[in-house]
Image (cartoon, helix red, strand yellow):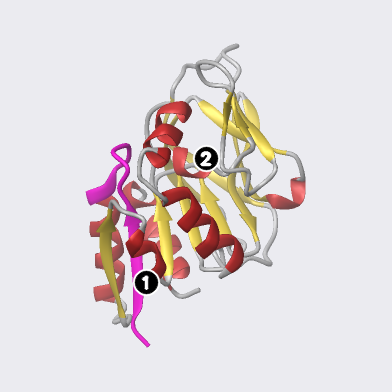
Amino acid sequence: MKKKVVVVDYGLGNIRSVRQSLKKVIEENHINAEVKIINNSYDIDTATHIVLPGQGAFSACMNGLMNIPGMIDELSKSVLIQQKPFLGVCVGMQLLANTGYEKGKHNGLGWIEGDVKKLPKESIKLPHMGWNEVLIKTKKNDLINDDKNYNYYFVHSFYFNCKSKTNEIAITEYGINFASIISKENIYGVQFHPEKSSYQGLRILKNFINL
């Protein structure tokens, strides 16, 4: 069966770069899959895998999703009920939280319990931009299928504060230790940009498609 990976375009994300990286992984690894950018809720139903990129403010990204008729309902049905593999990237990961505290208090999707807070400014520059090490906490996760620690490319000022540390698959140190990979059942999130993270980033995307 051919897999269909959809990248959700709601006006706030590095959409084309993510698509190109997914296409590269599919072609180089001869995976029976296709990638499509979508901006409506109808195409969610036909997807086997869902990728939600994001950049900018938490509230703007949530508003972008809410402004597409039926999008959040269709995402919830596909991810929470039908259990389709889901990957949130950068702010796309942060939207999985209950609440975001960027420019006020805003509701998120609430799929993984936690909130999104600003990194502490003491002795560090914001945004956190550039390469940094991702330290794997658990080997029992299909997105990361070994225990090696790699560097990935980050651009962010806020972090996901998980209520349950069991949802933290990996952490990164920048002023504090924050969750850089999170997971709950079929739901995954990465704070870094795999599409900008060379071989190791493409490896994450490959593992996701193979779920």
For the point 62% across and 31% down, the residue is 99
Residue 207 picture location, percent across and down: 47, 69
| C-alpha distance separating marks 1 and 2 | 22 Å
Kindly state the secondary structure of the residue where label 2 is placed: loop
Magenta-colored span: 1-16
Residue 40 picture location, percent across and down: 31, 53
Residue 161 location, quadrant = top right
The residue type indicated by label 2 comes to Leu
The mark closer to the camera, 1 or 2, is: 1
Question: Mark 1 — residue?
Answer: 46
Question: Mark 2 — residue?
Answer: 95
Which label belongs to residue 139? none
User: Is 191 situated above or below 207?
Assistant: above
Let me know if residue 3 is in the magenta part: yes
Let me know if residue 4 is in the magenta part: yes
Residue 62 location, quadrant = top left
Residue 132 picture location, percent across and down: 48, 39
The residue type indicated by label 1 comes to Thr
Q: Earlier in the sequence, mark 1 or mark 2?
A: 1
For the point 59% across and 64% down, the residue is 186
Could you tell whether 67 is left or right of 81 in the image?
A: left
